[in-house]
Image (cartoon, grey):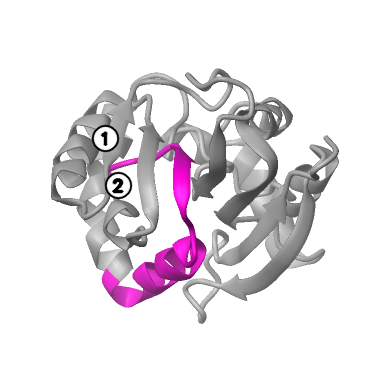
C-alpha cells in the first residue's frame, strides 16, 4: 500500500481484495507477525486496518499511521471494532508523529515495498523504537537470481509502481533492515501464494531488535 499521497483507485482495489487474501492465508501471517507483542506499538502503513483484529490483548495502544485518505477512513472503522486501543493518524513512514524511543515495537506489513526510500523509513522506525524494542516485519521481496528476478526488475522499471500505489517488487528488505542498524533475530522466507509464478510471491516474515546500546 502506498506511503505517500492519495491513490484512490489502488486504495479501493486493495480494500476490496484484502479480506479475500486474508481468508486464503494472509490472516495467518498477520497473526504470526503480531504474536507476543505488548505495550505501545506503531504500525506503519496500516492500510484499511487488516492487522487490528490480530493484536494481542497485552498491547496497550496501537498508533496506526496511514497517509492514504480512503484507506485511513476504512482503518478508522476497523479501529472501532478492535479489542485493543487503536489510534489511526495521518502520517508517512518518513516522518512518524512520535518522539524518540517512544514505542515498544514497530510493525510493518506489506508496506516497505512502497515507501519512496527504505533507508529513510527504517531510520525513522529505528528512531521511534526504544532500545531493545522490536521491529516486526511481513513484506514481499525480491526473488532469488533468475528469471523471476528479471521479471521483477522489468516491472519495477515500467508499469508496476504506477498501477500498484507505488509498490516495488524487487527490494531486498531484509538487507535494508540490517543496514539500518537492526539485529535480525528471526527471518522466514516463503512464497504467497505458494504455487504459480506471481512476481510478488517471495515474502519474508520476521523480527529484528534495536540494540540496547544504540
For disc 1, the marked residue is 71
**Residue in view at x 28 percent, y 46 percent:** 49
Residue at (36, 62) in percent of width and height: 56
Q: Disc 2, disc 1: CB below 8 Å?
A: yes
Q: In this rendering, would 161 be left or right of 154?
A: left
Position of 189 relative to 184 (above/below): below
Q: Which residue is mark 2?
A: 14
Q: Position of residue 45 (x, y in %)?
A: 43, 37
Q: Which numbered mark, 2 or 1, is in the foreground of this view?
A: 1
Q: CA distance from mark 2 to mark 1?
A: 9 Å
Q: Secondary structure at mark 1?
A: helix
The quarter in which the C terminus is drawn is top right
Q: Residue at x 65, y 37 (%)?
A: 130
Answer above or below: position of 170 versus 54.
above
Q: Which numbered dot is residue 145?
A: none
Query: Where does the image place residue 205, in percent across and percent down from the top left?
Result: 60, 64
Task: Give, as a single range, the part of the protein colored magenta.
Answer: 23-49
Residue 179, quarter of the rendered image: top right
Label 2: how many residues lie within 10 Å, few (<14), some (14-19) or many (20+)? some
Query: How many numbered marks does the figure carry?
Result: 2
- Residue 37 shown in magenta: yes
Amino acid at each position: 500500500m502506498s506511503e505517500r499521497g492519495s491513490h484512490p483507485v489502488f486504495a479501493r482495489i486493495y480494500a476490496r481484495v484484502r479480506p479475500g487474501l486474508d481468508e486464503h492465508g494472509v490472516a495467518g501471517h498477520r497473526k504470526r507477525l503480531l504474536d507476543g507483542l505488548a505495550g505501545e506499538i506503531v504500525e506503519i502503513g496500516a492500510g484499511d486496518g487488516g492487522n487490528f483484529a490480530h493484536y494481542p490483548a497485552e498491547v496497550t495502544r496501537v498508533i496506526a499511521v496511514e497517509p492514504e485518505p480512503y484507506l485511513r477512513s476504512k482503518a478508522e472503522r476497523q479501529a472501532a471494532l478492535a479489542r485493543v486501543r487503536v489510534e489511526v493518524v495521518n502520517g508517512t513512514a518518513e516522518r512518524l508523529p512520535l518522539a524518540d524511543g517512544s514505542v515498544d515495537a514497530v510493525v510493518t506489513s506489506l508496506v516497505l515495498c512502497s515507501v519512496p526510500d527504505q533507508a529513510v523509513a527504517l531510520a525513522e522506525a529505528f528512531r521511534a523504537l526504544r532500545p531493545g524494542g522490536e521491529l516486526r516485519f511481513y513484506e514481499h521481496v525480491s526473488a532469488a537470481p533468475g528469471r523471476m528476478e528479471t521479471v521483477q526488475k522489468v516491472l519495477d522499471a515500467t508499469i508496476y509502481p504506477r498501477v500498484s500505489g507505488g509498490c516495488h517488487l524487487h527490494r531486498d528488505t531484509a538487507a535494508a533492515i540490517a543496514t539500518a542498524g537492526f539485529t535480525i533475530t528471526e527471518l522466514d522466507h516463503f512464497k504467497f501464494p505458494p504455487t504459480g509464478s506471481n512476481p510478488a510471491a517471495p515474502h519474508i516474515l520476521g523480527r529484528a531488535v534495536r540494540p540496547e546500546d544504540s
